[in-house]
Image (cartoon, rainbow, N blue to C red):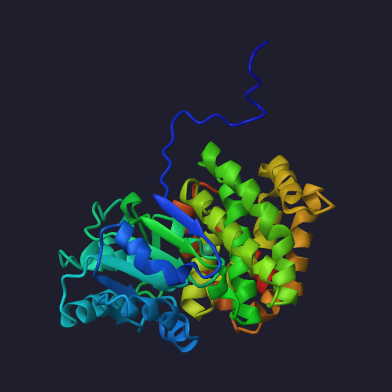
Amino acid sequence: MSFDSSTFTVPTSFENHLPRRIRFGRGLSGELTAELKRMEKSRPFIVTDRGVKAAGLLARVTGPLAAAGITFAVYDETEPEPHFACVTAANAVARAAGGDWDVVVALGGGSVMDTAKLVAATLRDGRDAVALAGIGKVGRRSLPLVCVPTTAGTGSEATPVAIFTDATSGGKVGVVDPCLVPDTVLLDPALTDGLPPLPTAAAGMDALVHALEAYIAKCATPLARGLVLEAAGRIGPALPAVCANGGDQAARDAMLIGANLAGLAFANSSCCGVHALALPLGGQFHIAHGVVTGGLVAETMRHNLPSCTADLQTFAAALGWSDTTPAHLPDQLAALATQIGLLKALRSVTVPDSALAGLARSAVANRRLMDPNPRPITEDDAVEIYRRTLYAHG
Ligand SMILES: [Fe+2]
């Protein structure tokens, strides 16, 4: 009997990159001291932001460090959707605080973790972060990196990707290199308990989009496709639950695990059309990343449907949705984005029709994300997806 290769795509070659160590547990962020000891590191430089600090989450990490007599320094000025200047500013704070830091700790969401990735790559050798934009330009990371996410969504703690806002164009730029994959990840869902409803929904829907795009991307590795099914099994039921009741700790737990699995998946596959379309729109109009990806996913999948019908059916089943008819998936995604407030948030931003051609041009030019998309997206297609998403079928 011969092997039926129509059932599974068998790639001719692939690589997988994963963090060395991933731990999960409520309260785990208080165990950073022991984790650093295990790594034989004793001088952490912590990258975070003001929101994390104001929410009292930084103190949960630094309190035990101080009690253990560990010297640390903190950069807490990471901006949302950061510019490369954030990396420079963080490095300056680290040097002014005495230098000789032997590990970088990221405590925050995607913006913080992305900034910390480049701090860990440039603090010791002083390279200009702007020059590292693109694929495979980093080459080395001289400091180990521990990521402690405070949102369930970006998956940045699992990936070789850091996204920055370009100071000149205002668009988003990716820095992609296997050496950016963090060494150690501490998943503590207690850190996500207090996240307000809209950021919870945006981050959660972004995780769902990561899982979906990692599954349908043409470059998906077998490992990535397996991870997606586990991710979807958690995100499917937990996302509406956590949006309906932010105090549902079991749903918070499931979302953090699901988002991490989705991050591991797209780190070993790719995001594709939704993210290509989302980056210029979010960058130019300063809209939170998950609001944009969560808003765009339905119409992008309506476009992709003819090229990934079976995968969409499998994905809907993995989410636990009772209706797995592929043609219904776009409407179901739109209904979910509406239910959890993302489409309303996206449509509250004024994006003039005259801006769409430029956005479409930028999106289609992003070959890193467009090439893996299962169906080609032309500039005309992109304008149509933007219109249908932003103007309610206008
Ligand atoms: Fe994303």
Query: Residue 335, position in %: x, y?
Result: 78, 67
The one of 294 and 229 positioned closer to us in this rendering: 229
State whether residue 169 is above or below residue 275: below
Q: Is residue 102 above or below residue 16?
A: below
Give x and y (percent) for residue 151: 54, 71
Q: Is residue 113 left or right of residue 216?
A: left
At 35% from the left and 50% from the top, the residue drawn is 178
Query: Which residue, as the protein is rendered here, is positioned at the far top?
Result: 1
Residue drawn at x 62%, y 31% as measured from the top left? 8
Q: x%, y% of residue 196?
A: 62, 82
Picture coordinates of residue 240, whole percent (x, y):
74, 68
Q: Is residue 344 left or right of residue 221?
A: right
Q: Quadrant of residue 47?
A: bottom left
Number of labels in the image equals 0
- Figure quadrant of the C terminus: bottom right
Front one among 113 and 386: 113
Q: Nearer the viewer, residue 133 or 224?
A: 224
Does residue 116 appear left or right of residue 155 in this picture?
Answer: left
Please say whether residue 358 is visible from this viewpoint. Answer: no
Above or below 252: residue 347: below
Between 30 and 248, the one nearer to me in the picture = 30
Residue shown at 69% from the left, 77% from the top:
247
Task: Give the left or right position of residue 21, taking residue 379 as reference.
Answer: left
Q: Where is residue 44, by image quadrant?
A: bottom left
From the image, which quarter does the N terminus lie in? top right
Q: Residue furthest front?
A: 68
